[in-house]
Image (cartoon, rainbow, N blue to C red):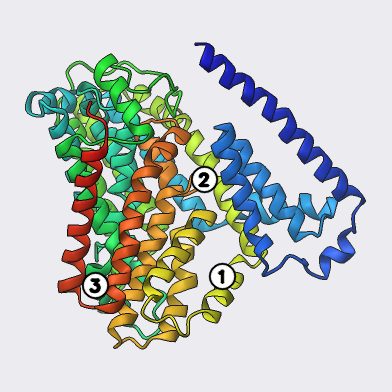
Amino acid sequence: MLEKVNYAGRRMRFLPAAAALMTVLMTVCAFAEEAEEAAAGSRFYETAWALLPPVIAIGLALITKEVYSSLFLGILTGAMLYSNFSFEGTLTHAFNDGIVAVLSDSYNVGILVFLVVLGTLVMMMNKAGGSAAFGRWASERIRTRVGAQLATIALGVLIFIDDYFNCLTVGSVMRPVTDKRSISRAKLSYLIDATAAPVCIIAPVSSWAAAVSSYVEEGNGLNLFIRAIPFNFYAILTIVMMIFLAVTGLEYGPMAKHEKNAREKGDIFSGMKAYSEAAQTKSNPNGIVADLVVPIVVLIVSCVIGMIYSGGFFSGDGISFVDAFSESDASVGLMLGSAVTLVITLIYYLLRRSMSFRELAECLPEGFKSMVPAILILTFAWSLKAMTDSLGAKQFVETLVKGSASGFQVFLPAIIFLIACFLSFATGTSWGTFGILIPITLSVFPLTDPLGIVCMSACMAGAVCGDHCSPISDTTIMASAGAQCDHVTHVSTQLPYAMTVAAVSTVSYIIAGFVPNAFIALPAAIVLMIGTLFVMRKVMPAK
């Protein structure tokens, strides 16, 4: 208890210092050059200063354990740099060009609508007793911690359509099962996060494949994506590591403490509060497993149909399924699919008499409230990305990469992987990283060059790695929401695992640079990953 008090005291001492720092900075803004100079362009454009806003946001989040104010301070820092410390320019850029702009973007609004509908569906499934029924059914068949973790991994791999959908669906379905087997929420959020983006980036039929394919102008995007899958070491090795951890029980870093508390004390939160403080609702004791399975199956089918609809599959122009998926709009597809699912689920529960219409209607505001933390963090994260974009962070990194590409071709896959990790970690977006690095790679290597395929895969793997580690990543935020885990706890416990895979992936890309053959490089990477984990198991203190 004394340690908690001391920690709280340190946080309370830090917060006034942070507030004072921002007051000084804003005072400087008020007396600095005004909007005339800002209109001429920022003097920090396309410089290393463009990466300062995400660095501040991430650093403050890790120090204070408070993500909302950290992100907002990062947004203000970016706006100040963009406006050359103009008070008026800072406010207008932070709110008009930042928060308001991202909330006016149709793609972002579609994602937010999808989240609200998904929260409502989860609330309906809980009230109808579907989640509790599945928990009872699974508890009878999944009797061990290993089985619960492997079942979570398997479900995450099966839901490969989209990472948002994966995070929230796997979380809502598996929470009762993992809670029953005393698996910490930190471990559950790691399993969810590690089967979201890493699985989507190696699934040809996914919104991620569509996004990557769109960056290849020659029209061979999907073919290039499929050829790059065997070299996507980070994604493949993450799955290997998850299975190894589940089977052997190896834990290290902060995760070991959380798992020990859950296993020995039954404390799945290790004293931390749940991610969402949504009110607990009474569930129907007569719920059956179908009350959970039917909405999820309908949601999967509806989202797939929504994705190909947004890609023009039903337009009558003879567009194939693959082409429609590669041209799809994930925001539109997921929004329409979830809306159709909501209507069908509503009718299903009314026919089942699981709830009255009034009780079903009450799930909408309750589901919205459960998603408020995720929506708020997403809004701030998108706004922070807008700040870095306006400062020319992409152009700065592009110039840096192109200037150092020649002369390091053999080591280029590893270099591109590390640059993609850093860029994705700093900006919190893997798709934005694809857009920066994939065109650069394709301009250096022709599509027929085997090393070019390895470098393209390194772009995707590094982007997913940085996304996996970043506290401002939307996928990481969704994993916290899906597991109902404190967000900073999820980030801090997942980071050592992600960094282990990243280190092995870097060595694997060096090997692939010398031998760009998937039949040699991929087995070597897997053996290296398993060997590293066995060594760590030997050197870790026995539990």
Question: On residue 397, which mark appears?
Answer: 1
Identity of the amino acid at label 2?
A: Leu
- For marks 2 and 1, give the one nearer the viewer: 1
Q: Is residue 340 visible?
A: no
Label 1 environment density (alpha carbons within 10 Å; few <14, some 14–19, many ≥20): many
| Numbered mark located on residue 226 in the image | 3
Give percent across and percent down for residue 53: 64, 52
The answer to whether mark 2 and mark 1 are in CB contact below 8 A is no
User: For residue 378, which numbered disc appears in the image?
Assistant: 2
| The image quarter in which residue 480 lies | top left
Looking at the rendered structure, the secondary structure element under dot 1 is: helix
The span from disc 3 to disc 2 (Cα, nearest Å) is 30 Å
Say which element carries label 2: helix
Q: Residue at x 43, y 48 (%)?
A: 469
Q: At x 19% / y 24%, what residue is drawn?
A: 181
Label 3 amino acid? Ile
Most extreme residue toward the left is 141
Marks counted in the figure total 3
**Secondary element at tag 3:** helix
411 or 37: which is nearer to us? 411
Q: Residue furthest front?
A: 539
Classify mark 3: residues with Cα within 10 Å, few (<14), some (14-19) or many (20+).
some
State whether residue 52 appears in this view: yes
Residue reaching furthest to the right: 31
Label whose residue precedes the other's in the sequence (3 or 1) = 3
Residue 437 is left or right of residue 74, and the answer is left
Separation of marks 2 and 1 at Cα, in angstroms: 24 Å
Marks 3,2: beta carbons within 8 A: no
